[in-house]
C-alpha cells in the first residue's frame, strides 16, 4: 500500500496520472508529470507494470548550497523517479537493481536539489524499499530499509528518521486503517475512501512553510513564487492525493487512484468535494491492472 499527498504550487503546469512510456518503448508505467519548458518532465510518484515504484519529496531548506563546479543549473529531481520507472525492472531482478539504482543516485546526488527518494518493487515480496537523501546524515540513507512484517514508513520534507508532527499522526492513522484491513472488515472501495479521508485531514490553516510540518493536508496559502509558480506570489497547498493498493494473492493486482484536492478556479483555490461535486469524476484518475514483467 502506498499513500501520498502532493503539496505544490496550484498553478504549476502538471500532467495528470496516466500510462507513459520510455523513449521508443511501449506504455510501461503510471504517473503524473511536471511539465517543464524543455525535456520530458519528472514525477513525484509512480509505479510500473512490473510493480517497480518510486516516491520523491523535496527537502525543506532555507539556504541551499551553491551549485557544483561546472553546473549552470541543477537537474530535475523528478527525473530520479522516472529513471527507475522507465527501467520497468522484473521482480526477479529487483534486489540487485535497487542496489545499483541507489549507488547510481548516490554518485550524482549533488547534481540535484534537496530530495528524499524511496524506491521499491511491489512485485517482489521479499525485497525491501531503498531510501536515498542528499541532505542530513540519516542512518537509513543509501541502503535497503529493514523490512518487518506489518511495518509502516512515513516520509515528508525532512529525512526519514526525523519526527514531524504530521508524520507521526499519519503513521498512527495508517496503522489503524491497516488493522481494519487485515481484519477483513473493509471492502476495497471502503478502504480507498478511508485512506483518502486520512489524506484530507487538516490540523488548521497554514501561515508559513513551518506550519506544514503539523498538517497532513495543506490548506492553500499564498507564498512567494518561483519559476514553477510563474508568479511573484502564488497559491500553494495540497494539490493531489494518490492511493496505490497491491493485492497479496496471485495474480497480483494494482489499483492506482489519483484525486485532485485543491484546484484553481478563476485564480482562487477551491477544495474538490467527493462524491458530491457534480464534476468530481473529472477530478479522479483510476487504473487497475495485473502486475506483469512483460
Image: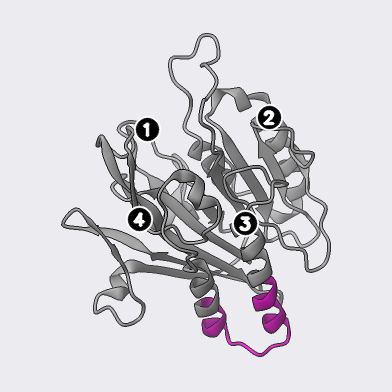
- Determine whether 146 is above or below 291 in the image: above
The kind of secondary structure the magenta stretch mainly shows is: helix
The location of residue 149, given as percent across then percent down, is 82, 67
Which range of residues does the magenta coloring cover?
A: 175-192
Is tag 4's residue or tag 2's residue first in the polypeptide sequence? 2
Is tag 1's residue or tag 3's residue first in the polypeptide sequence? 1
Residue 187 falls within the magenta-colored stretch = yes
Badge 4 local density, few (<14 within 10 Å), some, or many (20+)?
A: many
**Any part of residue 28 in sight:** yes
Residue on which disc 4 sits: 220
Q: Number of labelled discs?
A: 4
**Any part of residue 32 in sight:** no
Residue on which disc 2 sits: 106
Badge 1 local density, few (<14 within 10 Å), some, or many (20+)?
A: few
The location of residue 246, given as percent across then percent down, is 63, 70
Q: CA distance from mark 2 to mark 1?
A: 23 Å
Q: Nearer the viewer, mark 4 or mark 2?
A: 4
Label 3 element class: helix
Report the residue at 72% width, 42% height from top.
97
Q: CA distance from mark 4 to mark 3?
A: 19 Å
Amino acid at each position: 500500500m502506498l499513500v501520498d499527498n502532493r503539496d505544490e504550487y496550484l498553478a504549476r503546469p502538471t500532467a495528470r496520472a496516466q500510462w507513459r512510456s520510455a523513449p521508443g518503448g511501449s506504455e510501461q508505467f503510471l504517473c503524473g508529470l511536471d511539465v517543464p519548458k524543455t525535456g520530458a518532465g519528472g514525477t513525484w510518484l509512480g509505479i510500473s507494470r512490473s510493480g517497480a515504484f518510486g516516491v520523491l519529496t523535496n527537502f525543506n531548506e532555507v539556504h541551499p548550497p551553491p551549485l557544483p563546479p561546472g553546473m549552470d543549473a541543477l537537474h530535475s529531481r523528478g527525473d530520479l523517479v522516472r529513471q527507475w520507472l522507465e527501467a520497468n525492472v522484473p521482480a526477479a531482478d529487483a534486489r540487485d537493481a535497487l542496489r545499483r539504482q541507489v549507488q547510481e543516485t548516490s554518485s550524482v546526488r549533488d547534481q540535484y536539489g534537496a530530495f528524499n527518494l524511496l524506491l521499491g518493487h511491489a512485485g517482489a515480496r521479499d525485497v525491501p524499499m531503498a531510501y536515498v537523501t542528499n541532505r542530513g546524515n540519516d542512518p537509513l540513507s543509501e541502503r535497503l530499509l529493514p523490512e518487518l512484517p506489518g511495518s509502516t514508513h512515513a516520509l515528508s520534507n525532512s529525512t526519514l528518521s526525523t519526527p514531524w508532527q504530521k508524520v507521526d499522526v499519519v503513521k498512527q492513522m495508517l496503522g489503524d486503517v491497516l488493522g481494519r484491513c487485515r481484519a477483513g472488515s473493509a471492502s476495497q472501495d471502503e478502504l480507498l475512501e478511508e485512506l483518502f479521508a486520512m489524506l484530507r485531514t487538516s490540523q488548521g490553516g497554514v501561515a508559513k512553510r513551518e506550519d506544514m510540518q503539523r498538517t497532513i493536508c495543506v490548506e492553500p496559502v499564498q507564498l512567494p513564487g518561483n519559476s514553477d509558480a510563474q508568479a511573484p506570489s502564488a497559491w500553494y497547498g495540497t494539490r493531489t492525493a494518490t492511493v496505490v493498493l497491491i493485492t497479496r494473492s496471485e495474480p497480483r493486482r494494482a489499483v492506482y487512484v489519483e484525486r485532485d484536492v485543491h484546484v484553481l478556479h478563476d485564480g482562487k483555490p477551491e477544495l474538490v468535494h467527493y462524491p458530491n461535486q457534480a464534476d468530481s469524476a473529472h477530478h479522479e484518475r483510476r487504473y487497475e491492472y495485473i502486475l506483469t514483467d512483460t
